[in-house]
Amino acid sequence: MSTGISTGSGPGIGIRWTYAFIDRPAGLLRPAQAFWTAVTATRLSETRGEQGEFVTLLPGEGDACVKVQRVDSREGGAHLDFAVEDVDGFVESATALGAAVVGAHTGWAVLRSPAGQLFCAVPWHGEAVRPAVVDGSRLDQVAIDIPSAAYATEVAFWERLTAWDSLTGSLPEFHVLRPPAGLPIRILLHRLGTDRPAASAHLDLACADIGETRARHERLGATAVAPFPHWTVMRDPAGGTYCLTGRDPETGGLPKPTTTDDPA
């Protein structure tokens, strides 16, 4: 399997860092920023963009890997930024695989996957050190929710674009793209049981103890939406949904099953 960091040409070229973007509507931006800086133990950077729509969550140690963007949508969502060595080369590879460019800017680009999920190609500025686990949890995954009819094509697209390790998930409707060691954000591809007009995305946190993390998030203003055996769907104070998952915050993987001397 590929390492995902390549100095050659083709899919996966030069992906050197990944950012998870928290997209929230303008009127709810401040509560979103306050909540996500608290749960990730970060502080806000200066705003950027033509309308001050971008802000980075700066960790105390390590390099940033989470940003917040003001969007026009009522619901918001999430998306990925790929920091790459060659933006033009990455965009060329992405479009050859079926992506469409929806915004060409000086030095960076906004693209849309075949199923409609937005993502960006941006220059790599030397980011290399992953932030630490915070209170037993880590924001480490962007989950893309994909209409069932588009799932096979979308999985193939992201596999080829990233050239990361491609793994079958814990359930038939999940597929994981695991980046090389050191990259901070991985991708979960989720096949929906019902179709939608386009794919959408949300954030996942890996939690050593879902219950403890849930209680902390609720104290900070989040609400629980739906509990499942191995994850809990949450809603942040800005109305955006995300998940707390029972994965190892250090590795991102599922915990190893415990053994017992009792054969029963």
Image (tube, rainbow, N blue to C red):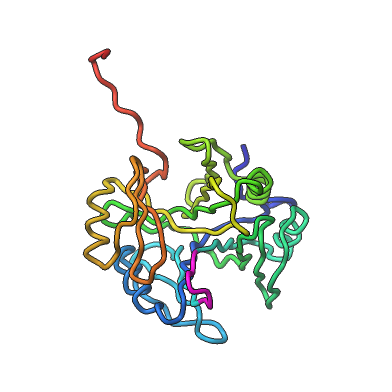
Q: Position of residue 172 (x, y in %)?
A: 52, 35
What residue appears at the point 65 percent right and 46 percent down from the top-left corner? 149
- Residue 229, image quadrant: top left
What residue appears at the point 55 percent right and 82 percent down from the top-left corner? 49
Q: Position of residue 262 (x, y in %)?
A: 23, 15
Give the magenta range.
71-77
Q: Residue furthest top?
A: 263
What residue appears at the point 59 percent right and 56 percent down from the top-left corner? 196
The quadrant of the rendering that contains the C terminus is top left
User: 178 or 89, which lies in front?
Assistant: 178
Horizontally, residue 49 falls left or right of residue 217, namely right
Q: Position of residue 2 (x, y in %)?
A: 62, 41
- Residue 83, image quadrant: bottom right
Horizontally, residue 237 falls left or right of residue 190, namely left
User: 113 or 46, which lies in front?
Assistant: 113
Against 3, residue 172 (above or below) is: above
Q: Residue furthest right?
A: 96
Horizontally, residue 31 falls left or right of residue 81, namely left
Secondary structure predominantly adopted by residues drawn in magenta: loop
Q: State yes or no: residue 110 in magenta.
A: no
User: Does the image show residue 179?
Assistant: no
The quadrant of the rendering that contains the N terminus is top right
User: Does the image show residue 106?
Assistant: yes
Against 76, residue 150 (above or below) is: above
Q: How many marks?
A: 0
Q: Residue furthest front?
A: 194
What residue appears at the point 49 percent right and 55 percent down from the top-left corner? 142
Q: Position of residue 212 (x, y in %)?
A: 22, 51
User: 242 or 141, which lies in front?
Assistant: 242
